[in-house]
Image (cartoon, grey):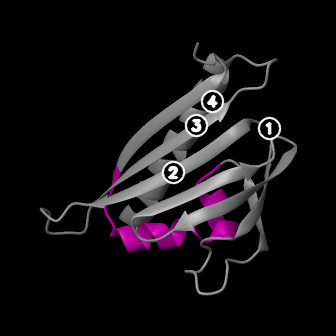
Amino acid sequence: MADVRMISINITQNIAATPSQISEVLLEHEQLNRFFNADFQLIKKQNEGEIAGGKGAVRQVSMLGIKFKEQIISADNQHISYQIMGNKPVAEHRGDIYFYEDNNTVTPMTQVNYKISCKAPWWLSSFVLGFFIKKDIAQALNKLANNFKSGAV
């Protein structure tokens, strides 16, 4: 039987930028509060030989009075993968952000596909938590897209 607490979110956004531009901005951990409703602090740099902010980097996330750590599992210009370290505020959390460049446009255009899976705590409805995570990610991707539209990179 499937775990009813498991949440799976998949959001797509087209952004007027190259995959490398988007990846670079999303790996500037301490600047992510421009897009997400949280504060981020880099507490460990990427592993030696990895791109800036990439594999091995650990950031502390502060949101709604809760602090937790996320670790970058892998990062390049096609994909960023991260996970929450530990089981709070949600268990088995993994985020995967894929970048697909559209070569059929005159100006650079990338389809960003943001996938999150996690398990809601026993005391919180997975439907409610999924709704708020999806809303937050959609809002962040809109802010990210607007950031590139305005040339404020």
In the shown orientation, is residue 75 left or right of residue 42?
left
Nearest to the observer: residue 82 or residue 42: 82
Disc 1 crowd, CA 10 A, few/some/many (<14, 14-19, 20+): some
Disc 3 crowd, CA 10 A, few/some/many (<14, 14-19, 20+): some
The residues bearing labels 3 and 4 have C-alpha atoms spaced at a distance of 13 Å
Figure quadrant of residue 88: top right
Nearest to the observer: residue 17 or residue 44: 44
Query: Which tag is nearer the camera, tag 1 or tag 4?
Result: 1
Amino acid type, callout 4 = Phe
The location of residue 10, given as percent across then percent down, is 45, 37
Residue shown at the point (55%, 80%) measured from the top left = 51
In the shown orientation, is residue 54 left or right of residue 105?
right
Residue 36 in sight: yes
Query: Which tag is nearer the camera, tag 1 or tag 3?
Result: 3
Q: Earlier in the sequence, mark 2 or mark 3?
A: 2
- Residue 117: give its label: 3
Q: Which of marks 1 and 4 is nearer the N terminus?
A: 1
Disc 2 crowd, CA 10 A, few/some/many (<14, 14-19, 20+): some
According to the picture, the residue beneath numbered tag 1 turns out to be 89
Helix, strand or loop under label 3: strand
Helix, strand or loop under label 2: strand
Q: Say above or below: 35 vs 50.
A: above
Q: Say above or below: 111 vs 9.
A: below
The residues bearing labels 1 and 3 have C-alpha atoms spaced at a distance of 13 Å
Amino acid type, callout 1 = Pro
According to the picture, the residue beneath numbered tag 4 turns out to be 132
The boundaries of the magenta stretch are: 14-36
The location of residue 111, given as percent across then percent down, is 32, 53
According to the picture, the residue beneath numbered tag 2 turns out to be 96
Helix, strand or loop under label 4: helix
Q: Earlier in the sequence, mark 3 or mark 4?
A: 3
The residues bearing labels 2 and 1 have C-alpha atoms spaced at a distance of 18 Å
